[in-house]
């Protein structure tokens, strides 16, 4: 089935939050501070999704949200695909759209953060030309402040 990209709307928030939470847990549990894992609840994913709809692009397959990407400035902040669509090419289509958004906003380079233990994500980005630029502490925001999460910074020049 073809993949259709479009800006997210408030009607997509529930589907995005479910995909985000499931994907986040798959890639992050056991690799992030326990404090952050405890703070990431279904309610927080829904709230964060609602706040970020304007920065979100969804991929639809068969009329259903199959994945999404959030872009903030030059950062590709979130890329998640429903488990049933992993390996189908949806993630690559979303990432390419995010790269175009960063370039269209006038940034020569896009960046994103990856948890070191998320080997699947790291391989995915590297296959698409992203380069590991080294470690840094990513400030993961939550209602009471933030938690510093050790990450790898990936970069890609965007045309």
Image (tube, helix red, strand yellow):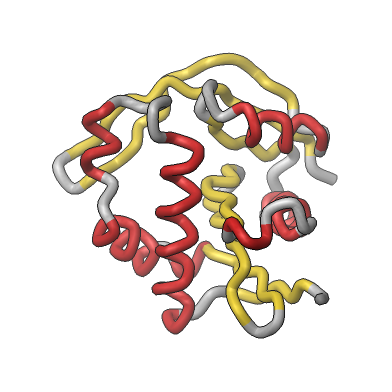
Q: Which residue is drawn at 68% across and 21% down?
A: 132
Q: Residue at x 59, y 50 (%)?
A: 79
Dividing the image into 4 quarters, which one contains the N terminus? bottom right
Image-quadrant location for residue 144? top left
Q: Where is residue 126 in the image (x, y as percent from the top left)?
A: 76, 30
The front one of 148 and 92 is 92
Q: In this view, does 126 lie above or below 135?
A: below
Image-quadrant location for residue 128? top right
Number of marks: 0
Tell which residue pokes out farthest to the left in this image: 144
Q: Where is residue 62 in the image (x, y as percent from the top left)?
A: 70, 82
Q: Which residue is drawn at 55% across and 31% down?
A: 114
Q: Is residue 56 left or right of residue 34?
A: right
Q: Position of residue 16 (x, y in %)?
A: 47, 66
Q: Residue at x 58, y 62 (%)?
A: 68
Q: In this view, does 113 lie to the left or right of 128?
A: left
Q: Is residue 68 left or right of residue 92?
A: left
Q: Is residue 118 above or below residue 135?
A: below
Dividing the image into 4 quarters, which one contains the C terminus? top right
Tell which residue pokes out farthest to the front in this image: 84
Image-quadrant location for residue 109? top right
């Amino acid at each position: 089935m073809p993949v259709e990209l479009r800006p997210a709307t408030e009607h997509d928030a529930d589907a995005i939050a479910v995909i985000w939470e499931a994907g986040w847990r798959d890639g992050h549990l056991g690799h992030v501070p326990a404090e952050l894992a405890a703070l990431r609840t279904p309610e927080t994913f829904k709230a964060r999704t609602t706040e970020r709809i304007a920065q979100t692009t969804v991929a639809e397959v068969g009329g259903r949200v199959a994945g999404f990407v959030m872009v903030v400035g030059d950062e590709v902040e979130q890329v998640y695909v429903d488990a049933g669509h992993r390996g189908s090419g949806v993630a690559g289509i979303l990432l390419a759209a995010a790269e175009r958004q960063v370039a269209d906003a006038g940034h020569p380079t896009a960046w994103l953060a990856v948890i070191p233990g998320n080997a699947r994500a790291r391989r995915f980005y590297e296959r698409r030309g992203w380069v590991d630029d080294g470690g840094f502490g990513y400030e993961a925001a939550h209602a009471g402040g933030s938690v510093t999460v050790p990450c790898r910074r990936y970069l890609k020049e965007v045309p």
